[in-house]
Amino acid sequence: MGFSTDAIHAGQKPDLETGAVITPVYMTSTYAQEELGVHKGYEYGRTHNFTRAAYEKNVAVLEKGKYGIAFSSGLSAVNAIMSLVKAGDHVIVGDNVYGGTYRLLELVLKNYGLDFSWIDTSEIDNLKKALKPNTKMVIIETPTNPMLTLTDISATAEFAKANNLISVVDNTFMSPYFQNPLTMGIDIVLHSATKYINGHSDVISGILITSDDKIYERLKYIQNAVGAVPSPFDCWLCLRSTKTLAVRMDRHNFNAQKVAEFLEKHPQVEKVIYPGLKSHPQYELAKKQMRGFGGMVSFLVRELEMTKSFLKKVSVFTLAESLGGVESLVCHPATMTHASVPKEKRESFGLTDTLIRLSVGIEDIEDLIADLEQALA
Ligand SMILES: *Cc1c(COP(=O)(O)O)cnc(C)c1O
């Protein structure tokens, strides 16, 4: 089946009891058992929930994987991945991954005897150089936030296989519609479903997808043992949302391309970063491993004063953290999402104070361009 057909139908059948076309929200913490040891496979809500199972199956199909395992946030999904390694193990991580991932690994989990190397994964040679005898896992994010730097997914998978490492790709920015790392040999795909998968800025949720039976068994065990499960209602919202993922992503992509091209011609703009522009240094790689370029656009204005007045003057774009919703958002990474990253480190990968990040929504493109135009004037 095609992506949209799967998005609308995979994991879902009309309800057996009533014929309801939409999978119901099973708001229940426990299930009746007919007699001792006899039940319908459902015992307790943390372990089993029908709405969650439908959502997990749905996203697994969209990511071309066998299994989905849902969590209460993207970060609790990252935390579950880390249960696959143990004290004394070494993990290679991209140096420009989501700030919360950095915080969880470096400032929380490091205390449990894990060792992390933070490297620029856009150069595959750097992965090879970071390898240690106790390396067990490699985690990349592509494209990164907010610099939109790409890492070669197939090359990363090859490196991981050759060295017996578990490979993980945070695919939040592309969504399953534009990029499927499992098909390129990656072991685990991670999504903050808070972003494009749910897409309506009203849920915090995360999901992992894998086709590896052993990895699945462990992650499923951890999901229940740790208990960071999403609510049935959040699962229902995400399942409702994936039905429109394809049309939303097409529109995000269309609008972002137009916005990037508009900004690239604007005299107040010093530089635009968008993988769909020929000026992006990894444009060829983007075309190779992605089916679209997504809705995120970063750009640098010429002066710091301009940054402030721009953020004050935008009106269709809302000044806010997060991304991937239907509404357009603007953020200033240096003081918002990346404020905890030391200035020197930030600037070493180009994240300066004049950098502005847009999450381009699905509003009318004319209104978005007009808003940017008046804010830059
Ligand atoms: C938001 C985000 C996360 C964390 O997800 P939460 O749902 O906020 O916990 C992880 N990775 C990326 C790329 C993100 O954008």
Image (cartoon, rainbow, N blue to C red):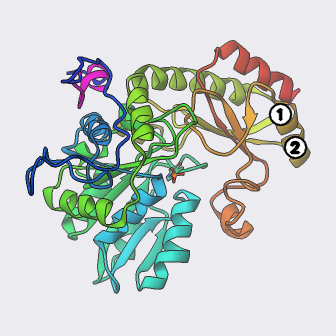
The front one of 361 and 264 is 361
In the image, is residue 332 above or below residue 329? below
Q: Which residue is mark 1?
A: 268
- Residue that appears at 37% across and 32% down: 239
The front one of 46 and 65 is 46
The local secondary structure at tag 1 comes to loop
The local secondary structure at tag 2 comes to helix
Left or right: residue 187 versus residue 335 is left
Question: Image quarter for residue 326?
Answer: top right
Q: Is the CB–ligand 1 distance for label 2 below 8 Å? A: no
Left or right: residue 364 versus residue 198 is right
Which of the two marks, 2 or 1, is nearer to us in this view?
A: 2
Residue 261 appears in view: yes
Q: Quadrant of the N terminus?
A: top left
Between the residue at mark 2 and the residue at mark 1, the CA separation in whole angstroms equals 13 Å
Does the magenta segment cover residue 118?
no
Give the image location of residue 283, x and y in percent: 47, 38
Q: Amino acid at mark 1?
A: Gln
The front one of 211 and 93 is 211
Question: Image quarter for residue 158?
Answer: bottom left
Give the image location of residue 214, x and y in percent: 15, 62
Does the magenta segment cover residue 5?
yes
Give the image location of residue 71, x and y in percent: 39, 52
Residue 277 appears in view: no
For label 1, count other residues whose C-alpha is less than 10 Å away and answer few (under 14), some (14-19) or many (20+): some
| Label 2 vs 1, first from the N-terminus | 1
Q: Amino acid at mark 2?
A: Lys
Magenta span covers which residues? Answer: 4-14
Q: Which residue is mark 2?
A: 308
Q: Quadrant of the C terminus?
A: top right
Left or right: residue 28 versus residue 373 is left
- Residue that appears at 24% across and 47% down: 31
